[in-house]
Image: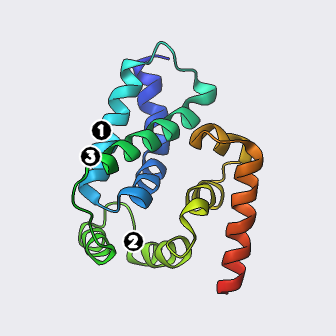
Amino acid sequence: MTGKQITEKYQEIEQSLAKYAFSSLQCVQDVEDALQTVALKAFVHRDLLTSEFFSQWMFRVMRNECVDMIRRRKKHMTLSDACLSVMESGLYFSPTDYVVYKDMFQRLPNTCREAALLHFGYGYCSKEISGIIECSDATVRNRIFKARKFLRQLA
């Protein structure tokens, strides 16, 4: 892929990547750092990328970057601090979106949250999600099923 193609594709999914990163990092500044790192990695590996799997590759790289950032983080931000920083910045979520997001996905068990967010929030199928989070397709379907069941109990 050329630099121009990468830029165009990246701009199409930047908001989705930011929301996805925020679900793990819960800090606007960390999300911005992760977005910058992921974009840089896309440019570095532009010769290996194809437009067909670009979005999937970017979500996988973002997931790995979030995991790395969480491992490096010594102090954990509380959910109320995260909520306040997002509300003040208004960069990635409107207050309504954040409340819906928080209520729905933060109550899910940790094992189901990532698969449910990718499926319900971004419309990925189980096969694509299995490629992003590096587990079997059956495991992803099971996690989505459990998340759906859990969300029905909340309603």
Nearest-to-viewer mark from 3 and 1: 3
Nearest-to-viewer mark from 2 and 1: 1
Q: Earlier in the sequence, mark 2 or mark 1?
A: 1
Tell me where residue 146 sits by quadrant: bottom right
Identify the residue under disc 3. 72
Percent from the top left, x then y, of residue 72? 26, 46
Q: Earlier in the sequence, mark 3 or mark 2?
A: 3
Observer-nearest of 131 and 31: 131
Describe the element under mark 1 as helix, strand or loop.
Answer: helix
**Image quarter of the C terminus:** bottom right
Q: Amino acid at mark 2?
A: Ser
Could you tell me which residue is drawn at 35 percent across and 57 percent down? 25
What is the number of the mark on residue 58? none
Q: Amino acid at mark 3?
A: Arg
Percent from the top left, x then y, of residue 65? 38, 40
Could you tell me which residue is drawn at 46 percent across and 44 percent down? 63
